[in-house]
Each structure stands twice: as structure tokens, then as C-alpha cells.
Amino acid sequence: MLFETHPVDLSELMAKVQSGKIQLPDFQRPWKWDDERIISLLATVTLGYPLGVMMTLETGGSGTRFKPRPLDGSEIPVGTEPQELLMDGQQRLTSLFQALASGKPVDTMDVRGKKLIRWYYLDIERSLDPDTDRETAIISVPETRKLPETSARGAIDVSTQEAECAVGLFPLRLVFQPKLKEKWMRAYGGNDDSRWTRWTEFQSTSLKNIESYKVPIIRLTKDTPKEAVCTVFEQVNTKGVQLTVFELLTATYAGDRDYFTAHGTDFQLPEDWEQTKGKLSPYPMLADLQDTDFLQAVCLVSTYHQRRGRPGTDPFGQPSASVKRKDILNLPLTEYLTWAPRIVDALRWSAHFLTRQGIFGSGDLPYRSQLPPLAAIRTVLGDQADTEEAERKITRWYWCGVFGEQYGGSLDSRLPRDLEQVVSWVRGGREPTSVALASFPAARLNTMSTRNSAAYKGLYALLMRQGCTDWTYTKEPINADIFADQQVDLALIFPKQWCDANKIPRERRDSVVNKTPLTNRTRRIIANLAPDVYMEKLEAEAGLPGNWLDDIIATHLIDARYLRGTSGRGGPLRTMPKQAILGADDFDAFYEARSAKLLELIEDAMGRRAVSREAAPESAADYQQEQPA
């Protein structure tokens, strides 16, 4: 046999990574999982749930000589020869090693790609509560082991062992360190019998799940030919596709006996979904809606109504609604048939809501993942969502999600919480957590440079929502029809060639501050011309007096004086000779003035002030590198 399959203790895998007995073939791509994925993985292991199969290759074979390299985070002597190469499972094993066994904080990132350094803790109380989502029990804290009051978790200080024990947060870095774990346990228990009782239960559940966790390993022997190894590696990296909840529900619903008895045929979920897509096809911003998004919305509303009647239900406590995979898989066909048509109606309403926000196409939707809760909120509220006050609150929640960049990671907890808290807020309750804790750092404007950022697309939409008018197609502000017919897209205000010639830093050149939505016709006129040159061409093309064009440009929150080479610094405004004076100083002045205007626009949408650059400095270097749009 060229392979063998057997389970291996997680502790043994950690030791093999630490010693270099398991390494990577050098052709493997770099590791980089974000903070939320790591939390989800740790939750899986602490629950004792399967995390999938890994594959290794025994070294020493004549046909399988690959240059090795250590897993990220492991420190082994140069030249250490591995016994096995990890062919499949790098992201999972590296994440577990760094969080549980490296003894160092994890070098990761958030869902926006901003670099983070994190330690991971397990909340003892939450882990013992069967009704608490396990991911909420995994606490991620900065390298300082302190979270500020403004964080989603509130203020947390676990910078000392005493502080860790006081709040009952067990450091997962100690799980495979018996002596240090015992020392921590004694400090936690102290002379408090109730704490010792909790520890005993914690030890026998969550910690035991980690300590006894076994990972199924497929081990290719050293006799495996290189061509077979390459074939296997290609397959596990490109063809491993997990069955979706939609596919699993398709099989479940097709076997529903009650439906067959009533209709004389099986229910075909794919056919129903195709019909649903047809009903939503007139709305371009919904074009990328996925079947799983639709199921999430149905499940949110179904579970909300099924569980909402419990006495003492608090929208700020454990959510009643759910979009967990298991709950979607357990969604009865009768519930799907009840709520699916109403979700379709709610999605139509959502499309009109998005149009009012300046979002006209699916590629410009900041978060597709915000559609399920938006549709669910409308479904639960019904006509209550149509009042002016309700629209104001839902709109504010929406933009806090976009500019707080809250919808890019694991959403099992966020979607139900937002549904329940926004519905409660519209009905007179208190402000949702996602609104209260949302923040936008002013320095983020410098790092928003591509459509990979939801906030980037959100700002693009806000400019159109507030009535910006194209610079040649000046009949009316950009709307859905103009957007589609005139091929509106973002353009550099100070073009690339001009910026490069004037040594404008790439971070500023590509920032959303130096971009604005314009029609294809206007973008062609601008091309790579200097701003003062293209301003003259625009005046001639549109047949407008200069002051009229300046007023139109102002609808984009741009002071046209900076494009014409006019300085507002050091006293009264004075017009300078064209082309002779326009330079980096004008760009810097433009950049600062427009940044201030854009921040005001964001603050108005969120209903709160941005965090100053001094309080939250950041730069492009703080993020994983993106390619410019």
C-alpha cells in the first residue's frame, strides 16, 4: 500500500511541528488565516468536533525529495530533516500550533486584512453554558493582553496570571504545558470551592476535548512515486469541495413524505431556487445572491418565530434566531414553504432600500452577507419597516455594519443578534450592539484602495446617495439608470501619470480619497491628463461655464480650486498660472480637504464621530497587500 490511515493525537502533532519532524514542502503557499477563522477552528476543537482529514508524506523516498520548510511559528534548527511533509492541512495545523503550542502570540489579521497579533483564551463560564455559542467563548486579545472599552468585548485586561484567573479566562497557550497549567489551575481555584467545581467540569469537557483530540491522518509512504504525490496534492488543493447546506437540504426535502403525499411529487429545492432567482432578476444589486444566503434569511425568520415566545427572552442575551449550519439543515420543509415567499418579498424591498443608499449593482454591494439579516428584519417588521423612523434606524444599522466592517468574518452570532436587536430597536428598544460599538478610524481612508474593502464600496455609494453629478452628463445626479446606461465607475481625480510625475505616494494616489464615480465618457476625457488640463476639456465638452463646472464638481465633495492650480493657503485665494504651479502641494491640500468632507459623510451615515488619526493610526503597511483597482 502506498498510504495508510490512522488518527494521531493533536498533542503529538504539536510536538512534531515543534521539533521539525513535520514540515512543509517548500512549494506550499504561505500560511495566513484571519482571526475569526482561528477562533472558529479553536471552537471546533474545544467541542471535540471533527476538523477534517490531514495528509502527510513520509520522507526518504527516492522519488519524493522536496525541499522542506518549517510551519510558520515553529523555530527549529536550520538543517533539521523532517520525517513527514504536510501535504494537506497547513492552514489548520499551523493555526492550532501557533495558538496552542508555540508559546508566542499569533501573527494574523482581521477580516479586512489588517495585521493583528493575538493571544487566545477560553472563557470558562461561557464554555460550560450549553446554550452559548462556543465561538463567543473563545476570546482573542492583542499582544498586550488588553482590550479597550471600545472593543466588541468591552474592556478586558488579562496581562497577568492573576488577572486571567480573576475573570476566568484560561490561556490556551498552556493547554499542552502540564506544569504551567497546574499552576494556573491552583491560582484560579484558590480557596473557593465553587471555582474548583467549575474547574473540574471545565477540565472534563473543554480541556479534555483538546488534550484527547485526535486528527485523522492519511500518510503517504516514502514509496509513493512523485507523479502520484503531485496528483494527490493537486486534487486536495483544487477539488476538495464540501457539500453545501443547500445540496444537503435538496436531498432532505426531496424525501419529504408529507409533501409527496399532498402533491404526488417530490419537492425540488433547485427548481424552487431557480424560480426565486427569476423573481429577483430585475434587481441588479441582488444578482450575486447565493442559495445559502437565501436559506440563511429563511432560517433566521423561522427560528426567530419558533423560539421567540419563550418567557423572558432578551434580544441582548443569547439570540433566539440562528443561522448555524445544523439549524439550516434541520429547517423543516413546511417552514421553508411558509417563509420563502415572504423572504422573496423582503428581498425586493431590500433592493429598493439599497437603491436609496446609492447601491445600484451587485459588484458595488459592500457586503452580500448583510442581505440575509436585512431581508429577515423586513420580514419580521412587515409594514413597520416603512415608517420614516424605522427607515432611519435600519439605514444607520446598515452603514454601521459597512463602515464598522462587521460583516466580513464568521456570522453565526452576528446575523441573529442583528435581526433581534434591530427589530427591538425599531419597536422602541435600545440601540443595537452593532451600532453602539461601530467605529471608523479616520486613518482608514488612507488604506481603502480596492473593492476588497466594504468601506471603500460603501463610500462610493454614499457619494451617489448624496447626489453627485457626472462632470459631462449633467442632466441630473447619478441614479440607477445613469449608473447602468453610462457605465459609471470610479476614476482617479489626480490621474496616475500625474501622481507618479509629482511623486505622490502610492497609498495616497490609490486611496478612495483620490477617486470618485464618473461616467465612461468623462473618464475617457480625463484619461491621464493633469487636472487643470482636463478641466478645460470638460468645460468645452459639456459646454459649461467654469463656475458651473466647479459647482458640479463640488457635488463630489471636491473643491475645484485645487484641480485648477489655485491655492487657499497663506491668505486670500489667488489664481495661479495653469500647469506652472499645479503640483504636490495642491494634491496634499486637495487630499486633506476632501478627507475631511468624506469623514463628515461617513459620520453622518453612522451617526457617530470617526476615531481620530492620533487615536487610531494606521497605514497600508498594516494590511495584507492589495492590488490597486
Image (cartoon, helix red, strand yellow):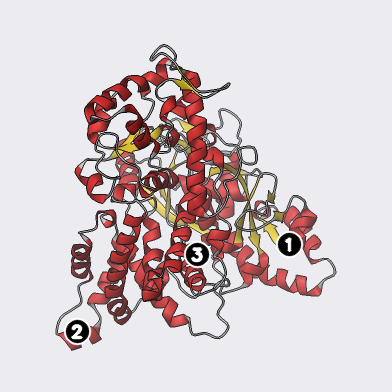
Three-letter amino acid code at disc 1? Val
The quarter of the displayed image where residue 561 is located: top left
Q: Is there CB contact under 8 Å for labels 1 and 3?
A: no
Q: Nearer the viewer, mark 3 or mark 2?
A: 3
Three-letter amino acid code at disc 2? Phe
N-term-proximal mark, 3 vs 2: 2
How far apart are labels 1 and 3 at the CA level? 22 Å
Q: Nearer the viewer, mark 2 or mark 1?
A: 1
Query: Mark 1 highlights which residue?
Result: 167
How far apart are labels 3 and 2 at the CA level? 35 Å
Query: Eyeballing the image, is 185 above or below 80?
Result: below
Measuring from the top left, give residue 401's x and y in whole percent: 47, 55
- At horizontal 47% and vertical 57% (from top left) the residue drawn is 410
Query: Eyeballing the image, is 415 above or below 109?
Result: below
Dot 1 falls on a residue whose secondary structure is: helix
Query: Eyeballing the image, is 545 above or below 137?
Result: above
N-term-proximal mark, 2 vs 1: 1
Q: Is residue 441 left or right of residue 330?
A: right
The quarter of the displayed image where residue 213 is located: bottom right
Q: Residue furthest top?
A: 580
Q: Is there CB contact under 8 Å for labels 2 and 1?
A: no
Measuring from the top left, give residue 93's x and y in whole percent: 51, 48
